[in-house]
């Protein structure tokens, strides 16, 4: 059995990382970040899912299975020195990134601007196009927060799953894809009629 005192200590050690918590279950604790399991506290010891980064940081650590777990769950690595806050936070981050970061990141448009950074005329056109794309996505209920400020400036280009509404999870990517393919082929920003056509298409596919 893991004591609440130990679980509270681990949470305190990880306080520099957003959304890390220890959730009690059957006398032990599940370690989560952003609601995703990254390890367990079992009999007052800290175990994290095994990653290459963990093996690099803890080359002599024990790789084990602290309990009988569901088929398909990864092996664990034992973190004996939980007093080293910097090490523990690095391990928590590395574990989350290995197993879940790819699920969290939904769409990052900044790469399009980086790719075209040497072509200022293209950058200006792209910027104006993306104002239209993101405004349309907001107005059609795909995004939880408007990515355009009151002066018509883009304030967000990277979107994670948590930024999307349920409708957005289904339609934001295909709608954006249609928009970007169009703007790659022409200097004209899509018309409202064309945008409506794409919205209808993705909702009916």
Image (cartoon, rainbow, N blue to C red):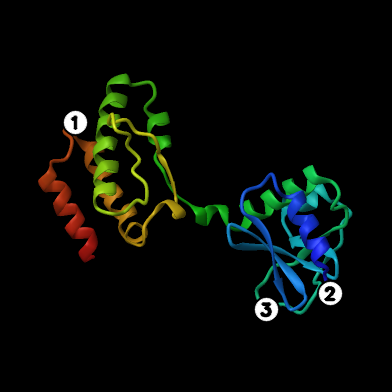
Query: Above or below — where is 203 with respect to 70?
Result: above
Foreground residue, 80 or 64? 80
Q: Locate residue 149: give its quadrant.
A: top left
Residue 77 visible? The answer is no
Give the secondary structure at mark 2: loop
Which quarter of the image is occupied by the C terminus?
bottom left
Q: Which label's residue is closer to the chain start, 1 or 3? A: 3
Residue 189 placement (x, y as % from top left) = 18, 35
Give the secondary structure at mark 3: loop
Q: Nearer the viewer, mark 3 or mark 2?
A: 2
Few, some or many residues within 10 Å of mark 1 (<14, 14–19, 20+): few
Q: Locate residue 118: give its quadrant.
A: top left
Q: Is residue 161 left or right of residue 91?
A: left
Query: Above or below — where is 2 with respect to 171?
Result: below
Q: Which residue is mark 3?
A: 70
Question: Marks 2 and 1, how far apart in space?
Answer: 65 Å
Q: Locate residue 151: give its quadrant.
A: top left
Q: Nearer the viewer, mark 1 or mark 3?
A: 3
Q: Which residue is mark 1?
A: 187
Q: Which mark is residue 1?
A: 2
Q: Is residue 95 left or right of residue 107?
A: right
| Circles 1 and 3: CB atoms closer than 8 Å | no
């Amino acid at each position: 059995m893991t004591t609440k005192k130990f679980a509270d200590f681990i949470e305190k050690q990880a306080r520099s990382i957003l959304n890390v918590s220890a959730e009690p279950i059957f006398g032990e604790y599940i370690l989560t970040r952003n609601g995703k399991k990254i390890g367990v506290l079992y009999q007052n010891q800290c175990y994290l899912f095994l990653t290459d980064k963990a093996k690099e940081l803890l080359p002599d650590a024990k790789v084990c299975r602290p309990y009988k777990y569901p088929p398909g769950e990864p092996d664990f690595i034992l973190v004996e020195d939980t007093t080293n806050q910097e090490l523990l936070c690095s391990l928590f981050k590395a574990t989350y990134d290995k197993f879940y970061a790819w699920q969290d990141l939904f769409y990052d448009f900044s790469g399009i601007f980086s790719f075209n950074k040497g072509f200022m005329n293209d950058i200006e056109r792209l910027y104006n196009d993306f104002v239209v794309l993101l405004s349309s996505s907001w107005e059609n209920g795909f995004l939880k927060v408007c990515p355009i400020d009151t002066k018509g400036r883009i304030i967000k280009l990277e979107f994670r799953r948590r930024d999307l509404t349920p409708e957005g999870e289904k339609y934001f990517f295909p709608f954006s894809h249609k928009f970007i393919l169009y703007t790659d082929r022409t200097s004209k920003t899509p018309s409202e009629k064309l945008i409506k056509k794409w919205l209808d298409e993705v909702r009916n596919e």
